[in-house]
Amino acid sequence: MTTQLVLGRDPDCDVVIAVPAVSSRHARLAWQGGQLVIEDLGSANGTWVSGERVQRAVVKPGADVRLAEVALPWSDPRVVALVKVGSSKSTIALMPRFGRYVCPQCKTAQVLPAGFVRGEIACPKCESALEIGGVGGASVGARVLRGLAGLFLGATATLAVGLVALLYLAPERLATAPDPIGELARRRMGTRVVAITPSEPSVLDPILAPIGPPVGSPEEASVRLYSATQIRDAIDPSNATTRNLAVQVAAGDDGPFHVEQIARIWKHVRLAWRYVNDPRGGDYYARASETITNDFAGDCDDFAILISAMVEAIGGRTRVVVMDGPGGGHAYPEVCIEGPADEVSQKVARFYRRSWDRRLGTRPAQTRIHYRTDASCPVWLNLDWTTNVIGGPYAEERYAIAVYADGRTETLAPFRPEGSSGTEASVLPQRAPLP
């Protein structure tokens, strides 16, 4: 089994990152003594963890690790396989529905997140990667003994009272019973959820309700942990600076919210945009109003946040998509348009026929709009800044995580060009022809 990976620009590296700023053999990611360690191999532009340059550091899966300015590709299959090698060595077999577990590394008892039954977590004390589960084939007696052991090691008086109550409450009453165990977990929970495997239906499920929206993938868990709150706070449609500019620009096509207003906002920002990197070794999510004050300067996530905030300011519904692709990490906005895709396509075509700006370059040869669709919205229109029109094509994605304006997150089907590896496992974003 592979316990280490060399990352760098050299084709002989285990994980090749073909970016000039990355050294030929830039860094090594390895399991050492039960810990996941990133080690710089004498690179020119450094290895960075949470914004600090390091020679060697213990990290956890999904952490903010950068080689020069390039984020470590946690979604790469070889990196995922390496992470699993380490976590599989720390499998804990217990009856997790009692709400407790004991870390085999630091020997401390911890509270499980409410609703957690099986999956991968990180111990909040020693940050060891732990896989909790494996009780399916155990006998009833063994499962009860393991559960009682976990209860003995970490139960508080409140938890004990709650468990005794469960023995006497009928299942029908549990659905409406108070939430002592769930509240205890909310007050004391320090465990970071990396991935959740949904539980089997049981009488405990109504009490141990999940905290927050479910995590759909390890990448989504990482985005929720490190980025979602910052993106949510940066989308400020009620700020006077953001709202005033959005209204002034959108009023060029007045009336109730419609796609032509989105096109005007996108064109206004796109024409003025000047790309500037974040500080080395870290992400900086500028508020939309701050980016306006800076005369439309920033990186891709600043552009996505600004477009999202301005569209929200005039009544739209948006999300920022955080993705990882062959060229590294990227972010772009999508907007929900209610109505048939063909109708949206016709409106976009009419807008550009009468409102084309030569500063955007030559008229595109694009013959269709590109969008996602789901049960909540018929057309999630792509508003990426990398093309010169709204509804431009998507770039290839290894994963795609949506962050909504209220901070909710969702794992999306990543875009992969037809014929590329993995296409069969993805739902491709839709395309509607332009008239």
Image (cartoon, grey):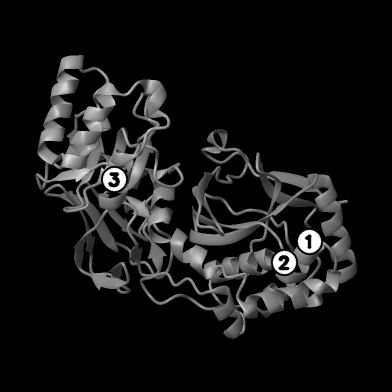
**392 up-or-down from 293: above or below:** above
| Residue 421, image x, y percentages | 52, 39
Q: 78 and 119: which one is in front?
A: 119
Q: Secondary structure at mark 1?
A: loop
Q: 342 and 336: which one is in front?
A: 336
Q: Select label 3 or label 2 by which is in front.
A: 3
Please give the count of numbered marks on the rendered protein. 3
**C-alpha gap between disc 3 and disc 2:** 39 Å
Q: Quadrant of residue 175?
A: top left
Report whether residue 271 is seen.
no
Disc on res. 257: 1
Closer to the chain start, of discs 2 and 1, is 1
Left/right placement of residue 67 relative to residue 227 reads: left
Task: Indicate the quadrant containing the N terminus: top left, top right, bottom left or bottom right.
Answer: top left
Q: Residue at x 21, y 41 (%)?
A: 158
Disc on res. 185: 3
Q: Residue at x 19, y 38 (%)?
A: 101
Disc on res. 295: none
Q: Select label 1 or label 3 by which is in front.
A: 3
Disc on res. 314: 2
Q: Residues within 10 Å of mark 1 (few under 14, many from 20)?
A: some
Q: Quadrant of residue 417?
A: top right
Q: Residues within 10 Å of mark 2 (few under 14, many from 20)?
A: many
| Residue 80, image x, y percentages | 34, 44
Amino acid type indicated by mark 1? Phe
**C-alpha gap between disc 1 and disc 3:** 43 Å
| Residue 135, image x, y percentages | 24, 24
Report whether residue 268 is seen.
yes
Q: Secondary structure at mark 2?
A: loop
Amino acid type indicated by mark 2? Ile
Closer to the chain start, of discs 1 and 3, is 3
Q: Say whether marks 3 and 2 touch (CB < 8 Å).
A: no
